[in-house]
Image (cartoon, grey):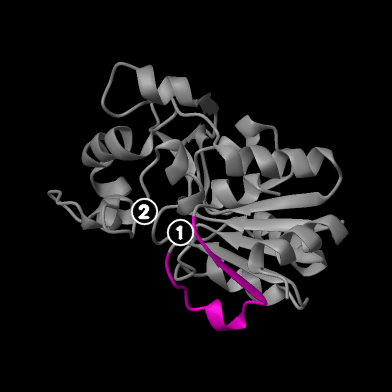
Amino acid sequence: MENGMDTLRRWVEESRRIVFFGGAGVSTESGIPDFRSEDGLYRQKYRYPPETMLSHDFFEENPEEFYRFYREKILIDEVEPNAAHRKLAEWERQGKLCAVVTQNIDGLHQKAGSRQVWELHGSIWRNYCTRCGKRYPLEFVKNCGTLVPRCSCGGIVRPDVVLYGEMLDQTVVTHAVEAIASADLLLVGGTSLVVYPAAGLLQAYHGSRLTLINRSPTPVDRRADLLLSGSIGELLSQI
């Protein structure tokens, strides 16, 4: 009988429309902390709960405190892609992987060379003025010299990320659903699968090669056709 890795190797070899759906656990191997693990941001103590500080209402009411937390804990740009990011980009170049759907906002998939990336929760690399819509790069928010970055028109510049209480970009969701629905192999890794509506996108997959790679159990484990436990980077680099 095949073991789990042998099965995954065979599936990858046979597949031509791989889609990868990933979360924070994909980037922890690059040094970016996740949210819900034992050492994650949500287990640390702050003046306000992280979920509150990363909400739309908090940003509107207290942009100074929002940006203190955002710059210290979220705006992490001096990191490199890991083995998982690089392997997925390699598969895309080979014509085997057709899309990455990610809950991460760090841009590491693109930095590794992936081109078809659907960012469900936005990106720290894009920013815009809340008044006039003018676009700004990450460096402006990071190095603007003021606690709250402001546009030339006087409006507050905010990151193009989805805050708690905000809707996902429906165009991105549509493309992500279409990619997942068309996959002949759906790889899911580094996500707790408890954050909705993102986790609900897996319902679009009706194939028979749903593969979950995680260090901890998820609510979807029973539905998986293949379940692997361990480091995503280590496992994918073996293929």
Q: Which residue is disc 2 drawn over? A: 56
Q: Position of residue 190 (x, y in %)?
A: 50, 57
Three-letter amino acid code at disc 1? Glu
Residue count near mark 2 (Cα–Cα under 10 Å), binned few <14, some 14–19, many ≥20 = some
The quarter of the picture where the N terminus appears is bottom right
Q: Is residue 224 magenta?
A: yes
Is residue 203 placed above or below 169 in the rendered structure?
Answer: below
Q: Is residue 91 visible?
A: yes
**Mark number displayed over residue 41:** none
For the residues labelled 2 and 1, say whether their Cβ atoms are less than 8 Å apart.
Answer: yes
Label 2 or label 1, whichever comes before in sequence order: 2
| Residue at screen point 31% across, 46% down | 59
Q: Position of residue 57 (x, y in %)?
A: 31, 55
Q: Position of residue 144 (x, y in %)?
A: 36, 18
Instruction: Judge left or right: residue 39 versus residue 126.
Output: left
| Residue at screen point 76% across, 77% down | 208
Three-letter amino acid code at disc 2? His
| Residue at screen point 50% across, 62% down | 214
How many numbered tags mark residues here?
A: 2
Q: Nearer the viewer, residue 43 or 105?
A: 43
Q: Is residue 130 visible?
A: no
Q: Which residue is disc 1 drawn over? A: 166
Q: Which residues are magenta?
A: 216-230
Q: Is residue 184 magenta?
A: no
Is residue 70 placed above or below 205 in the rendered structure?
Answer: above
Q: Nearer the viewer, residue 68 or 116?
A: 116
